[in-house]
Image (cartoon, rainbow, N blue to C red):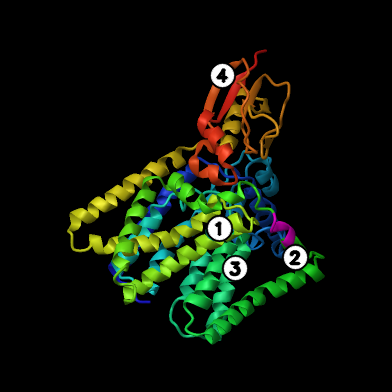
Amino acid sequence: MNLNLRATQVLFILMLAAYLLRLLLIVNGGQFYFPDESRYQRRSVGAVDSLFQADFRSAIDKVLAYDKHHGFTAVGLVPAIVHRLIFDLSPPPDFTWITYWVDRDNDYRVSALLFALPSVLSIGMIYLLARRAGAGETEALIAAFLLAASNSFFVFSKHFLPYDFSLLIGLAALWLAIPSQQTNIKHAIAVGIATFICLWIYFGHITFVLMIALIYCGFLASHWRDSAIRASGMAIGALLIATPLFLYNHYVLSIDIASELAAFSTSANQGEYAEGIVFPFTYFGHSEGGIALIWVLCLAAAGWTLRGQWKSESGQRAVLWLACLLSLYLILCLFSSVLQVAVVYGRIARAMTPFIILLSAYGITPLLLGRGRYVVLAFIAIVCIFALANFVPAIRQAYFIEIAGRARQDYGELSYETTLSHPALPIGVYGKEKPLARYTLLNAGYFYPITEMADLPDSEVLLKVAHPFNHRPWQYEGMTAEMREIINRDGLYIWLIDKGP
């Protein structure tokens, strides 16, 4: 595709600005806030340790051995290798590569710098998707700008999680899927490979993968024979990767991936199944705030424009984005509220964001063009203000790992307790607990479920910091409506108290 030099420069500046904002997000630390982030340490970091010790068989086994979100181990090798190279230049005293990661008090921001890249690259991918579907440069740039302003595509950037990697590959698969109406088995195989990789990196995006299959094999196919050829090609592409992995695990590692996947498929059960129908609306309302209002206005403009142009070339582009959005939403509702096999989480619902944005760009672009630069600048300024209103609290968010580390430096040994009542369980309270220590750190962990809170012990309060659970986007990662209500009503804080000598 020939890209206009000026448009490319604008896109590069936009992506650079987005990455710089992510650097500010990374500065505060916060890695290993989510319990699932330990998978990066267990798998990718461990594989790199074997690789650097020239134990290649062990490294290969660690990469190929089935684990939840299996493909994440492979993509995690890149940041892990870069981090290991920098680590070896000046290793911290008294730490090996493995103990460095187990301790949790060290600096993990080198890896985070690379984990921030997929969400930035997705901004460029949205531009390419829009252009691939026939959008002009202005519409494609507005789509990229709106994605850069999205909080749901911002907040996960510094965490060691597979979501952004998977979505980037999924968007690339969709880009492959929409070039023409013609059917080619080799092309279908390529789409199948890319789509399977998206799923293999993060199984939670099975809804996104099914959406791609429906669009490619149904919406874009001109005849049922084309649909059959496309579906067959996608299946072949998936099998080209899956078959060697299944065989290696079965015959070499004695791991039955099929049974493992069957067991894992029932694990998305934290939260409420019935909430799936309304979940995306409440999630985007609280996660995006003012940006969600802009989306609503842009989508209304898209609907108004589309009503008389849906058969035109530009209208067909909007119909495509609408088909992607509606099919993805309906699949989410089917899995959650209807079949009740998977609860919708914020990290799953955010896969709708690219299509909301592509449709929004389609709707707002005609209103901006021809109305003068001041109207365009006002639109950009409003979007930036709403985006920064979301980004700044995320950037300033304090995380309990860093709080616990500073408290241990200042006060020595700590005990760890919680004001949450039974059956709340801590998942990741860090540090060696000293039950008889003078200083106690309360609520310094990732807890589930969220329950009613007990009163604060009658002691001197040395520190009070808002727990990350108060950040609204994080309340949609497995919490029920009742749990969210408890936090928003009472607030959850990390306290450092002095019980006295």
Q: Which residue is mark 1?
A: 333
Instruction: Give the mark, 1 or 4, whose residue is nearer the N terminus.
Output: 1
Disc on res. 197: 3
Instruction: For marks 4 and 3, give the CA distance.
Output: 50 Å
- Residue at x 21%, y 54% (from the top left corner): 375
Query: What separation in Å lies between label 2 and label 3 (alpha carbons)?
Result: 16 Å
- Identity of the amino acid at label 3? Ile
Answer left or right for 253 relative to 228: right
According to the picture, the residue beneath numbered tag 4 turns out to be 461
Q: Amino acid at mark 2?
A: Ile
Element carrying mark 4: strand
Query: Residue 66, can we see it?
Result: no
The mark nearer the N terminus, 1 or 3, is 3
> Which mark is first along the chain, 3 or 2?
3
Q: Amino acid at mark 4?
A: Val
Q: Are marks 1 and 2 in contact (CB under 8 Å)?
A: no
Mark 1 or 4: in front is 1
Q: Which residues are magenta?
A: 262-266
Which residue is disc 2 drawn over?
257
Disc 4, disc 2: CB below 8 Å? no
Is 168 or 287 nearer to us in this picture?
287
Q: In front: mark 4 or mark 2?
A: 2
* Image spot of residue 144 (x, y percent): 37, 61
Residue 93, how many percent across, how many down?
Answer: 65, 40
Earlier residue among tags 1 and 2:
2
